[in-house]
Amino acid sequence: MNVPKTGKPAWAETDVDEVIPVLDMGSYIAGMPGALEELAAELRYACENIGFFYVANHGVPQEKIDRAFAEGARFFDLPEEEKLELKLDKYNIGYLPYAQSMIKSSTVAENRKPNLNEAFFCKRELPADHPDILNGRPFHGPNYWPESLPSFREAMLDYQKSAEVLGQRLVKVYAVALDLPEDFFQEAFTDNQIIHRITHFPSQEAPEEGSFGSAPHTDSGFMTILARDEVPGLAIRRTNGEWFPAPSIPGTLLVNTGDMCTRWSNDRFLSTPHRVLNESGRARYSMPIFFDPNTDYVMECLPTCQGPDNPPKYKPLTYGAYLDWFFKMNYFHQQGDGEPPPKP
Ligand SMILES: O=C(O)CCC(=O)C(=O)O
Ligand SMILES: [Fe+2]
């Protein structure tokens, strides 16, 4: 199939910055001929110009999303002492109490205020005798779950499995969008990292100047698959510097490219700044899955993102090295007393 180089789809005839495109994955998932190339052209356009896109007909059953949110709300309603038994560990797995993180990795804005949210982090569930657990492989710890709420574990892992299928499909679309063979990223995404977070943003009735549920930041990984409830609060920063809302659209998930993909693609795909402020008067919940390469895989500038006039801007790097820096910068429990580590 003939794929246009820019892949500029019909919706972009107007001002692209006004729109976060909705990419329909239905034909690709159904295996229709040419669907991957068409979708890749739309994704390329979205990632080169906006950094965010919605996906519709994404294959993740809505009831799994709803159930994870319902169980997540029950989890955050548990007594604080019970949640604190699962407090975030050195692998960044477990419960992050309210206002215990501050985004300092970001160059988007100078930030001095803690994020006004509480969150729970889990990963792919590994058995206790898995070699990565036994060997204490960095970023590969066991999950913690509240004993009083077994349905929370089930709902989270069930959603995670479906979202992982979507992630593996999207990685192929990213490859074609970057003019690479469909399976180019396969090795990097074998035993890939999944950081699965659910976040509770209590409403901020009269927020202090500079306070956010989540301060302006870019995401660290390859891409983020974001499920949200219908309560507004997310805004993304356009390339012209203006902020504009990214509303929830029923039946879609929101996907954004993270810093690792930007770096790997020599800045071709954008990692777009975003922030959250919930002033709705109601609790707000969101559930990102940070979908990332294997932590040991060395990412070197992609062959299609460099040339004589466009030499590689960044050194090869493992995702693990980047994640180590990112965690130390942003989470209080990861920080010692010394100087912040230099950016890798
Ligand atoms: O809650 C949202 O809509 C976005 C959350 C977010 O940016 C994040 O968890 O990295
Ligand atoms: Fe984010």
Image: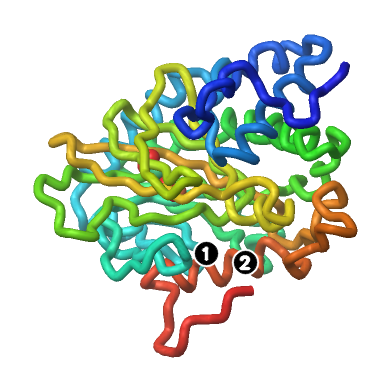
Depth check, mark 2 against mark 1: the one in front is 2
Q: Quadrant of the N terminus?
A: top right
Q: Count residues near mark 1 (Cα–Cα under 10 Å), then give few for <14, some for 14-19, many for 20+.
A: many
Residue at image location 55% in from the left, 46% down from the top: 290
Task: Name the element at disc 2.
Answer: helix
Question: Residue 264: which numbered mark, if any?
Answer: none
> Foreground: 78 or 344?
344
Residue 241, image x, y percentages: 43, 49
Task: Give the Cα distance between marks 2 and 1.
Answer: 14 Å
Left or right, 74 with reference to 87: left
Q: Count residues near mark 2 (Cα–Cα under 10 Å), then give few for <14, some for 14-19, many for 20+.
A: some
Q: How is the image coloured?
A: rainbow
Residue 228 vs 219, above or below: the answer is: above
Name the kind of residue labelled 1 in the image.
Tyr
Residue 158 visible from this viewpoint:
no
Left or right, 326 with reference to 70: right
Verify CB contact (< 8 Å) between mark 2 and mark 1.
Answer: no
Name the kind of residue labelled 2 in the image.
Tyr
Residue 94, image x, y percentages: 41, 56
Residue 38, image x, y percentages: 74, 19
Residue 48 vs 295, above or below: the answer is: above
How many numbered discs? 2
First in residue order: circle 2 vs circle 1: 1
Question: Residue 322: which numbered mark, if any?
Answer: 2
Residue 12 figure quarter: top right
Question: Residue 91: which numbered mark, if any?
Answer: 1
Residue at image location 46% in from the left, 23% down from the top: 64
Residue 252 vs 316, above or below: the answer is: above
Task: Name the element at disc 1.
Answer: loop
Residue at image location 59% in from the left, 62% down from the top: 139
Q: Quadrant of the C terminus?
A: bottom right
Residue 95, image x, y percentages: 36, 56
